[in-house]
Image (cartoon, helix red, strand yellow):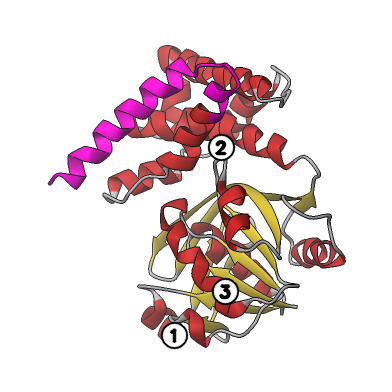
Amino acid sequence: MKIAVIGTGALGGFYGGMLAKNGNDVHFLLNSDYDYVVKNGLTIESDIHGTFNLKDIHVYNNINEMPICDVILVCLKSTKNSFIQAIKSIINDKSIIVIIQNGLGVEEEIAELFPNNNIIGALAFIASNKIGPGHIHHLELGRLKLGSYNQEKTHLVDDLIKVFKDADVDALYTDELKYIRWQKLIWNMAFNGACVILNCTTDQLLLNTSTREMIYELMRETIDAAKACGVNIPVDEVEKIVAMTDRMKPYNPSMKLDYDNKREMELKYIYEKPIEHAKAAGFEMKKMKTLLQLLHFKQAEYFQD
């Protein structure tokens, strides 16, 4: 099985690195880190799996030089999704495209580009950051949930799940892709935006009584929105998510890191699309709409500099 990693950052670097470490045929597409990784290798510093450096791996800075692959792991920021059409040069009709991105509505757009391919949505329940060129710091967690968007599950999907598990990645398949997308949004919509607006880490939000209650309210609104869209998530999921986050180390979500580095934030799929879907189903996400407006304001500040 040939596996391509498109976007070797916090997610692609970790999951691709774990697969390569276990001897799989992994091909990494890099951008600014290419020269560094060619010279120094890819370093995964995991607080769970230990630190390892991968030097003898396939790396590219031009997608047209990559081979045809059976599995394409798209780990780009969703703000870079205009690049995805370039993977046409490394797939055939049997290739599966795995979209490891947060938010809602990603698969619909990619399926229009690749109608003959099995599009797999994937949610990474992980705390991982890119902390330097070719250097990924995996703090904790790591579960990967996958679900087919447009086709029945094939043997290649089963094989991929096994490959992940053999590489010590907690991967599982679900038929409820819409459910897991909304489930992950409960955390992402609450913590990503709040950490940006309040310039803090996740633990700081939960240690303060007022912001802790705000997080609860944002999460409950997301559950109500999901229900309006036909996805029934138990209310006690909020308590489980908060308890999990309480146990986590102080963490800067990916959107906070993007803001700190003056990069475009993933507002379209994490906020705009869910708010649109909920509104179409008759539910107004009023709190999230306000949070989105504040995020647009914060982003405009540095784009206007």
Q: Earlier in the sequence, mark 2 or mark 3?
A: 3
Q: Is residue 239 visible?
A: no
Q: Earlier in the sequence, mark 2 or mark 1?
A: 1
Alpha-carbon neighbours of circle 3 within 10 Å: few (<14), some, or many (≥20)? few
State the residue lying farthest toward the left. Answer: 305
Query: Which callout, 2 or 3, points to the residue nearer the camera?
Result: 3
Count how many numbered circles sit on residues in the image.
3
**Image location of residue 88, percent across then percent down:** 57, 74
Quadrant where the image shows the N terminus: bottom right
Residue matched to label 1: 38
**Image location of residue 277, percent across then percent down:** 56, 29
Q: Marks 1 and 3: CB-CB under 8 Å?
A: no
Q: Earlier in the sequence, mark 1 or mark 3?
A: 1
Residue matched to label 2: 248
Front in this rendered view, residue 214 or 120:
120
What are the residue bounds of the magenta stretch? 277-305
Q: What residue is shown at x 61% (from left), y 85% (from top)?
A: 67
